[in-house]
Image (cartoon, rainbow, N blue to C red):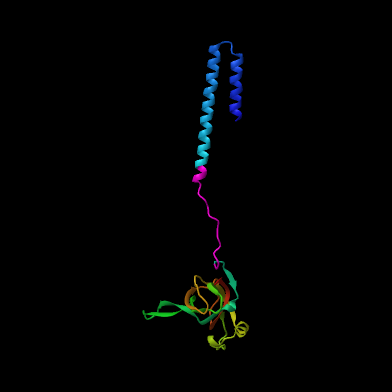
Amino acid sequence: MITFFVLLVAAVLIGLFAESNSTRVIGISIVAAIAVLVGGYLYWRDTATSVSRQARPTVPAQTRVPGQALTELSPSDIAIAGINLESGVETYWGIDGKQYQRPNLETWTLSGKVRNISRDHRVKDVALKVQLYSCPSYFTTPVAAIKFEELSLICSRIGERSVGLYGLDLPPQAEKTFSEPVSFPNQGEAINWRFWVAVARVVAQPL
C-alpha cells in the first residue's frame, strides 16, 4: 500500500510541475509501468506463499496408546527354575597321540527357565546376576541344596557378571526356557566350583 501511495504522489507531482504535455505523458507512463511491475510482483509473492502453506504437511499430534509404557517390577515377580551353569569343553592331544576332551573352565553356558508370576504385567526383559565361586575340597554340598549364606561364607567368589534375557514378552504365569553363553571377566581359577544366580532387574509392560 505504501508503494502505491508513493507512486500516486509521484504521478500527481509530475502532472502539476511538468514543463510540457510530452514530458507529463512520459513521466506518468513511467510511473504507471512501475506500478504494474510492483503490482505483479506482489501478486506473485502472495500466490507463492499461499501455495507453500497449503503444501506444508500437517504433523498429527502424538497420541499415547495405553499399555505402551514400560516399568520396573520387583525381582520377586520372576521365578527361576532348573538353573544350570555348565562349563565348556576343549579338545587336547594326549601323549599317546589321541584326542581327548576336558572341561574348559573359562567358558560357560547358563540355562534354565524364567516364569512371570506377576498378575497384571507382561514381562519384557530380565537381568540375572551370576556369581561363580571356588570352594575348598571339603565343601560337597550339591548345587540344588546350596544356600547363599553358606556359599558366600565358605567359598571365594572368582567371577561375577550380569546376563540379560531380552524380548521375553511373557504374559502372567507364562514361562520361557533360555540358554546363554557366559564368560566372567578376570575370572579366577575354578576349583571345586559352585555358582549362584539371582534376578537383578525386571522390565515389564502393564496390561
Task: Report the predominant secondary structure element of the magenta stretch.
Answer: loop
Depicted 133 relative to depicted 3: above or below: below
- What is the x, y in percent for residue 93? 39, 77
Quadrant showing the N terminus: top right
Residue found at the far left of this picture = 97
- What is the x, y in percent for residue 30? 53, 20
Residue found at the far top of this picture = 20
Q: Is residue 94 visible?
A: no
Quadrant showing the C terminus: bottom right
The answer to if 148 sits in the magenta stretch is no
Residue at figure coordinates x 53%, y 24% from the top left: 34
Depicted 23 relative to depicted 186: above or below: above
Viewer-side residue, 87 vs 189 = 87
Q: Answer with the quarter of the image where residue 97 lies.
A: bottom left
The answer to if 56 sits in the magenta stretch is yes
Q: Is residue 202 visible?
A: yes
Count of picture labels: 0
Residue at figure coordinates x 53%, y 15% from the top left: 25
Region in magenta: 52-67
Residue at figure coordinates x 61%, y 22% from the top left: 9
- What is the x, y in percent for residue 150? 61, 85
Viewer-side residue, 8 vs 92 = 8
Residue 45 vs residue 102: left or right? right
Viewer-side residue, 86 vs 48 = 48
- What is the x, y in percent for residue 73? 59, 74
Viewer-side residue, 21 vs 86 = 21
Q: Answer with the quarter of the image where residue 70 lies.
A: bottom right
